Amino acid sequence: MSRATREPPFVPDELDLMILEYMSGDANVQFKQLAESLKVDQRTIAKHVSKMKENGVLKNKIEINWSRIGLGIAAYVGAETGLGEKDLGKLHEFIRKEPRVVEAYSTIGSQEYFIKVLEADLQSLREEVMMPLEPITSKLTSSIISSQVKQQDDVSLLRFLSQRWFSSKKDKIRHTNSN
């Protein structure tokens, strides 16, 4: 049985991936410096960055270390609904309106929803977030993050994709040129 794959809305070329890699390391890198490092024209860099921004691939966004400003508790909450459309609507409304819910996902798997919550302390998490969730879910689980094992590593993933997508093309070119 073959797996149908959808074409992504934006297909990056090798230069796009290299630009993203550099910018992942330093979001403030200047186009001039990028152009020098990648040995391409500065206008080419600007064109690629602009195209990636237009397609939603690249966003200017800050990263906030919430624990440094007092939100030291991060929890992943798993929820199942099963109580009917009325409670599902209440759950969605709670997720949208609760500012301490910083991410939420509908899933396929053992939990219908995964919700990431940030809070200052365990008592507030329990009383102000978890307790209001309990009556609108049929099952609620939580895991408090105690330490981070791996940070988001965009550079490694970009290098992996570049290798996957472009090394076979380079190998074909080398093989053709060696014959």
Image (cartoon, rainbow, N blue to C red):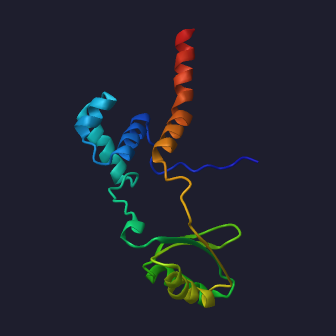
Regarding residue 116, the answer to whether it shows in the image is yes
Answer with the quarter of the image where residue 131 lies. bottom right
Q: Is residue 37 left or right of residue 153?
A: left
Q: Nearer the viewer, residue 139 or 71?
A: 71
Q: Residue furthest right?
A: 1
The quadrant in which the C terminus is found is: top right
For residue 59, above or below residue 99: above
Whether residue 177 sits left or right of residue 15 in the image: it is right
**Residue 55 position (above or below residue 30):** below
Tell me the quarter of the picture where residue 43 sits: top left
Can residue 103 be seen by looking at this rendering? no
Left or right: 147 as drawn, with respect to 15: right
What residue is at 54 percent from the left and 48 percent from the top?
7
Which sits in the foreground, 111 or 4? 111
Q: Position of residue 16 (x, y in %)?
A: 39, 40
Horizontal and vertical percent position of residue 31: 25, 40
Residue found 30% across the figure and 47% down from its top: 50
Vertical order, 73 against 19 (above or below): below
Residue located 38% across and 44% down the image: 25
